[in-house]
Image (tube, rainbow, N blue to C red):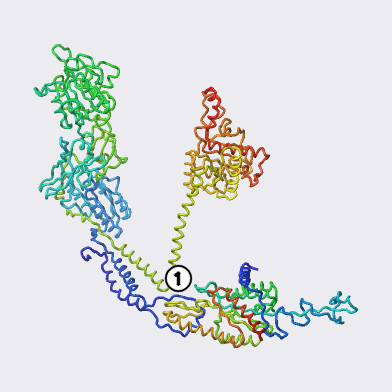
Amino acid sequence: MTFFGILTFAEPFILAGLIVLPAIWFLLRVTPPSPRRVMFPPLRLLLGLSATEETPSRTPWWLLLLRLAAAALIILALAAPTIGEPPKPLSNGPLVLFVDNGWTAAHAWKDREAAISDALNGAARAGRPVALVPTANIRGSISLLDAGSAQRQAEELAPVSWLPDRKRAAAALAHMHFATRPEILWLSDGLDYGDAADIASKLSKLGATKILSDAPGHLPLALKPEVNRADGFTVTVIRAETQGARHGSISALGPRGENLASTPFAFASGKDQTTAKITLPLEVRNETARIVIDNEDSAGATRLLDSNEKRRAVGLISASNTENDQPLLSDLYYLERALSPFADVTKGSVNEALSRNASVLMLADIGRVAGADYTTISKFVEDGGVLVRFAGARMTQNVDDLIPVKLRSGGRYLGGALAWAEPQHLAPFPDASPFRGLAIPKEVTVSRQVLAEPTVDLGEHTWARLTDGTPLVTAAQRGKGWIVLFHVTAGPAWSSLPLSGLYVEMLHRVLDLASGARPSDMGTGANAMFPAYTVLDGFGHAIKPGADALPLRGAQLSKTKPSPLHPAGLYGSEGAQIALNAVDAKDVLIPFGNIGAQVENYSGTAAIALQPLLLSLALALLLIDAVVSLLLRGFGFDPKRLLARLGVLALALALFHPGNARADEAFDMKAALDTHLAYVITGVPDVDAMSAAGLKGLGAYLHARTSYDPKDPMGVNLDTDNLAFFPLLYWPMDPREKDLSPQALSKIADYMRNGGTILIDTRDLTLGPSRGQDNPGEQTLKRLLGKVDMPPLQPVPPDHVLRKTFYLLNDFPGRWEGGKVWVEALPPPDPDAGPSPARGGDNVSPVIIGGNDWAAAWAIDNEGRGLVAVSPGGDRQREMAVRFGINVVMYALTGNYKTDQVHVPALLQRTGK
Amino acid sequence: MTAEQTRLRDSAEQIAAGLPPLLVAAERLASVISLGVHGRRKSGMGENFWQFRRFQAEDASTAIDWRQSAKSQHLFVREREWEAAEAVWLWRDGSAGMRFKSDFADATKIDRASMLALALGSLLIRGGERIALYGDGRAPTMGRAALNRMAHELIERQSGDALPPDAPVSKNSTFVWFSDFLSPLGDIEDTLRRLARAGLNGQLVHIIDPAEEDFPFQGRTRFETPAGRQSEIFGRVETMQSAYRARFRAHAETLRDLSRRLGWGYLAHRTDRRPEVALVALFEALGGAKAKMRIA
């Protein structure tokens, strides 16, 4: 049932419930609010007193209204209203969504989404299973889903850059087994690929079918291949229908999507094709990456331009003066004819050509370039320009060095009256040649050429040769640019090449050198592979190619139509890309004719279900009512007190946060202003106290004996504190320590990687009876740091710098004696360097691991006496422990400086002192 | 002694610390039965020297004061002045209503009553008086042990009778009655007359929760007794406020009149006020009687 044209109720009879509202109003008025309970010892004194009135009607009118509104909302919500009318199901069987999702659907994808969402909502309400059949990318078999999963799958459904394959989709659908006759909703793109009537009849055989299509005037548009003319692009736009006029605009977009130029187009009524011209200067035109129809957003309305589409400015320079007299004998005439379809040609002097920003210079039969021109051209080539030279009579005598290979003087005649040899044909192009893949016409013969001196690298420089092996085209790279030499004239005097189509294509390839492509990438041999570079999605947006996009083969290049295996997009590598566009020159768009079934148009907007909204509104009203009722009864809280408490809470929060930040800052400040010794706060109070005392003691010794005066040791919380300020961290192991958080682990890994040193003390004999694997300290180490990336370790070798940084040490006692101390393994000693008294790696060892409980040995009380007895004991052992501590601190602070120190005598000797 | 007992005793002593040792005024100055550690002007049990008298046959030989006897031919016996302390009986109402505390009060009425009772007891003990919790079957005793025992009893007896039972009391001692006096007035009057007849002089301490006096309620309310036996619903109770307050004032007035007629003192204490105030008032009321007697 529909009201006001837009509001539809699924269960209109529930609206009858609205007549109970007055009853609710009456009940609310006569029922007093439930009393508040109060304990009151002097109740006896109250007895006999009476309040002036019992207060049922004191429920305020606005509260009454609130409650009535909530009741009304609930009733309305139960009637399941929607804005817009949801589609009525044709049957109660499963729902099949047969969706055309080629680029032809992309321009109005929102309509499809709305239709899908409507259908799925209906299916969800009715509990019908759903099958989603995207006709363009049907993968494997189709399965029936519940509406929820279908919703998720539908969200992922997007148009693709190729055309749908409805036959395959219909066949896959026909293979499915449905318990009851399904309802099929064909969300079509309105185009007939020659099989529309067939598909429609197939579908209606399978189930009750409803076909949706774009309204007339909204069928897709497409861009046919553009023509790159001298003054701009000429673009052909096609449409599916012919009725009515339609207009729009086309834009040329740059590589970053910037709009370079736009031009309007208009279809006259009855026409399905129109052309528009985008006028652009050459430099800007070469920047064009794509041409699109504005607001059409489909792969078919997008044309990618590849490097072949760029027009180059070419300067033609000739020495002869026959151009004007006898144009057909002029070399430049042939060049100009060959180049003009894809290049802007300038004739004149070198300077004139370069002032027009020519990127290619062609010299026809100029033997020696001299003077200023020579310098100009050399610089042009060095800077990346392409110099193309053609041989001629002048080159046979006297030639400069702007040529790729050395030439013999004189020349070679073939097939002349006095020559033995026949005019030569062209041999197949070498693999490294940019001409690879071009078809060689049989009729091309060469009767005269200049010859190259045979050298070892001649083959490398040869891009084309004659059947007898002599080079026809040679090239060499000079600086950033190229020099290419055609060993024949630019005109037909020496060969029939300039008369053939091959000449045009060869010149075209040569021009591509100017865009920075490598010659080997430019050939399109039958076996060359072009991997997908970027591909288009159905909306015409460039995306990264998926794993299933296969490379194009050179042989298929002109025949390939976009498909799931080859999405439309750019193929090839940087600088030498080939565009595969969704639409090619032969494509036409044909609308549905009579396909033997009723076709409806998309409604465009989905029906919006209001039930959840109404129910949440009602819930909100009821919550407000509950709070208000409590307040009215004075229940529990006094608004003033509540506000005060909230205020206090807010104040506390406000104070707490900056306070925390200040504390952090203070820690960082303190840690950064001095070099502190630091220990890891393990969370075990006695261990932490011992660490602090130990480092304090060590600090006192350092102050007494070295120039380093450490301030008070700092405890470091691995979770919250910044480790970057500490060159050395002392970390005692204790089984009571908690496992580290992932953040702490990554912090430790960072610390070790960036040059920090952690002195890990497993405190073997403090924690257990013996050293080794089973010792609780080592097990703790394994538990805490097993996940950290540890460098390879070795026991401190006798020549390790750790033994020499301040004192010369043989062993490293702490509270206990013996046990090994491990450091990062040093690289093996350099056999050539001879014996060295000390070795260290390039960096300090990120970890030093031992188990002698050093902190306990270092710890002193306020009078400077040791806190803990050392075992087996003696002042000597404590002294050695302190010396080890000093060595470790010096090691962490100075790195491998001491390894260099051993060279001091030699250095002094060398300076002669 | 449990922790709670200690806490109660400590807090009671804390509020009592500000006052000088309390000597309960003798009501009948000339009477043989009167004051606390004041000399009774006759020989008897006591600390202080009263007189030497000649040894008599019935005297124990250990009673001879040999130093005095050595000064003359006769044997002498040292007699001491008889000293006797005042006995004070304390009664704290233990009914369910006493365990009430409104949002406006600092403590339940029973806690406040216990604390005042103990603070008073502490003062009395320091003044050398004898105290006892009425109705526990023990005679009034002196010393800290008495105070500790009373604290123990107060904690243990969390629930009990509203009115003091008919228990034997020593004549002419003082009785301090802590209660909210919400029992029927007739019962209170009967009890009071019985105690007065027994020769007790005393003090009523009316412990009032502020909600009971101010009646700060609004809207529709169901009032329940703490025992939960009785409840009553009223609508718009704010309209009853003035009528209730009048009733409550009348109730308190009746109590005051009753006690004045019997020569007892009456003192009201609200639980949202500081207990020291009540203790000072109580001190003055008990000590004031002594001052009055001096004038008389």
Question: Which residue is at 14% across, 45% downward?
Answer: A265
For label 1, the residue is A636
Q: Residue furthest top?
A: A418
Question: Who is closer to the viewer here, A393 or A220?
Answer: A393
User: Which quadrant holds residue A535?
Assistant: top left
How many residues crowd mark 1 within 10 Å: few (<14), some (14–19), many (20+)?
A: few
Where disc 1 sits, the SS reads loop
- What chain letter is assigned to the residue under label 1? A
Q: Position of residue A653 (x, y in %)?
A: 45, 58
Q: Amino acid at mark 1?
A: Gly
Lateral position of residue A615 relative to residue A723, left or right: left
Q: Quadrant of the C terminus of chain A?
A: top right
Picture quarter containing residue B63?
Answer: bottom right
Residue A663 placement (x, y as % from top left): 49, 51
Q: As displayed, is residue A736 above or below residue A346?
A: below
| Total count of labels | 1
Among the 4 quarters of the image, the one containing residue A394: top left
Answer above or below: position of A15 versus A516.
Answer: below
- For the question of whether residue A774 can be seen, the reply is no
Q: Nearer the viewer, residue A194 or A715?
A: A715
